[in-house]
Amino acid sequence: MTDTPDNRPFAIRTYAPDQLREALKRMYLIRRFEEGAEDSYMRGLIHGTMHLSIGQEASAMATCMELTDADKITSTHRGHGHCIAKGAEVGRMFAEFFGKETGYCHGRGGSMHIADVKTGNLGANGIVGGGLPIAVGAALSAKRLGKSDVTVCFFGDGANNEGAFHEALNMAAIWKLPVIFVCENNKYGMSTSTERSTAVKHIAERAVAYAMPGITVDGNDFSAVAEAVHHAIARARAGEGPSLVENLTYRWRGHSKSDRNRYRTKEEIEDWMARDPIARFRAELIAHGILDESGADAIAQAAIDDVQQGIEFAKSSPAPAVTELTRYVHAEA
Amino acid sequence: MNAMTQETGLRTLSYSEAIREAMALAMDRDPTVILMGEDIGVYGGAFQVTLDLIDRYGPDRVMDTPISELGGAGVAVGAALTGLKPIFEFQFSDFATLAMEQIVNQAAKLRYMLGGEASVPVVFRMPAGSGTGAAAQHSQSLEAWFGHVPGLKVIQPSTPEDAKGMLLAALDDPDPVMIFEHKLLYKMKGPVPAGHYLTPIGKAAIRREGRDLTIVAGAIMVHRALEAAERMAQDGIDAEVIDLRSIRPIDHATILASVRKTGKLMIVYEGVKSFGVGAEISAAVAESDAFDYLDAPILRLGGAEAPIPYNPDLERAAVPQVDTIEAAARRMIRREV
């Protein structure tokens, strides 16, 4: 017997090289998209506000790694990364941010309601915790309609103190619904740290109260997230019910455009920036021979090109007609 | 059963039986229709409206939820977004206050926020109104709250026939509909056609034609207004009574045409008088050419500016009754308002 254990990280031994390269591409795409959105905002091309997920790319991408278009996600106010990870085109996303008719929501939703129903993204949400019961409802549909689809519910550490969290997790558990609750714990709900807001150390500990598995992982480690979500998806597809996965991560930017960073230190931010999830994943792929440096550079450049094309598409797209202000309030007869 | 009722398929059913029949019919016709709510299974619901449906359709389609109004309503919204047609019963419409987030921020807005790329065909059933001795937190009439929200449709059928037809129309609607059912109407009996039919949302019904004044009323107030009108008819006062049926959208055309005919408008509703259905209808008349036909000030007769009290005399005094409707209408006819 010459079997030797495969000690490579979960993602490397589980996914094909093409899938891993595509995952890296989409992580770069998220980072460059967020930077492009921020830059467009600074130039006055985008109004309103936005919540950037720079630093959280591994959580979004690794969670969506095994989802099909038939699987659903519900997203959050910090949802650009989820949208890209689930398969959206950055051009139509930029168009939405620019308020254009070609945007995913025809300019009616903007950053906080970005959605792409065709790839299973039921939408970002402006209400903290708003997506939690909706995700449970999507999982109920799958079960009642006899489908094997699962629903991933992204939410943040802030949402875990909403009543909707308790109600949603309890119902998912009593009805054994195929939903994976993915908490992106970036340590702060706006300015309030989890230490000050949350009675337990790890949000995954709360899974015990709903008789479901709960696991806390390094959310900046692509492979660790992918492995935890893989097991939760398998459990959901097997009809065994929901799970709670907590990805510990960090947003490099402030909560929104109004944030002056009074509640965290420069040292803390720099410490987390040193744990850049994209750099780590890129190095891992190179170390395991999936890519070489020039291949990785080409992927990074392709993301830059896509984002630039996306911004151009958005700029040149038409705005919605003001006469269509009330269109989409109700179904059209 | 006489020959005529056999021909038209009319049977006499109670309001709650008519709703139950509509739900059963919908579940027979469409496997994606499910019922959700607190104690709607073997208990049959707080008002017995879902009685025995669990025996016919099983617990997967007649789902008891935990006491989780916010979460339950949100599950219904998520299910509606992804292929089911849930009918979600709030045990008392007052409890919808716990679920405002999902109703107002999510159900009502999802189609719009997503630029028409999504649909939320959910029906919320809302047992409403006072007169049961249940006091301030189980007796409210909050329909006007929801009438303020674009994206929602808000209806309040007053007869068993309409309760069935409007619930079926609500299920047929691709957008969220809130159906307010006055608790005192549940036992009221009336003719109900057999089989499937739709009573359109957004159309009022003239329940009594008259020349002298227009009374617009909703839900149980329709019946009180009709009784007051019959009393006044003995003295030669001929009131027209319009059953509003739908609060959002409101059938302005029927109301304005009636006001042009009678020149007098009284609005009777159980919700708190201020900022309510009466204000909306008054304003619509004031903004229209029908204003020129008014020969008396508009009169709103609504609920008291107080929570619904427990004491039965106080409770009665808190909302319009036949006597108060009649007295107010007579004052209006005498130009004393």
Image (spheres, coloured by chain):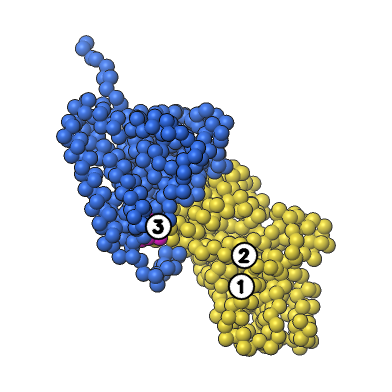
Q: Please report the bounds of the magenta region as a residue range.
A: A105-110
Tell me the CA gap for discs 1 and 2.
Answer: 9 Å
Q: Say which residue label 3 marks.
A: A47
The chain letter of the yellow chain reads: B
Where's the N terminus of chain B, which quadrant? bottom right
Tell me the CA gap for discs 1 and 3.
Answer: 34 Å
Is residue B298 shown left or right of residue B125? right
The chain letter of the blue chain reads: A
Residue B148 located within the stretch drawn in magenta = no
Q: Is residue A183 above or below residue B121?
A: above
Q: Say which residue label 1 marks.
A: B280
Residue A19 appears in the figure: no
Q: Earlier in the sequence, mark 1 or mark 2?
A: 2
Q: Say which residue label 2 marks.
A: B144
The residue at the point 44 percent across, 28 percent down is: A216
Magenta highlight: main SS:
loop
Q: Position of residue B203 (x, y in %)?
A: 55, 74
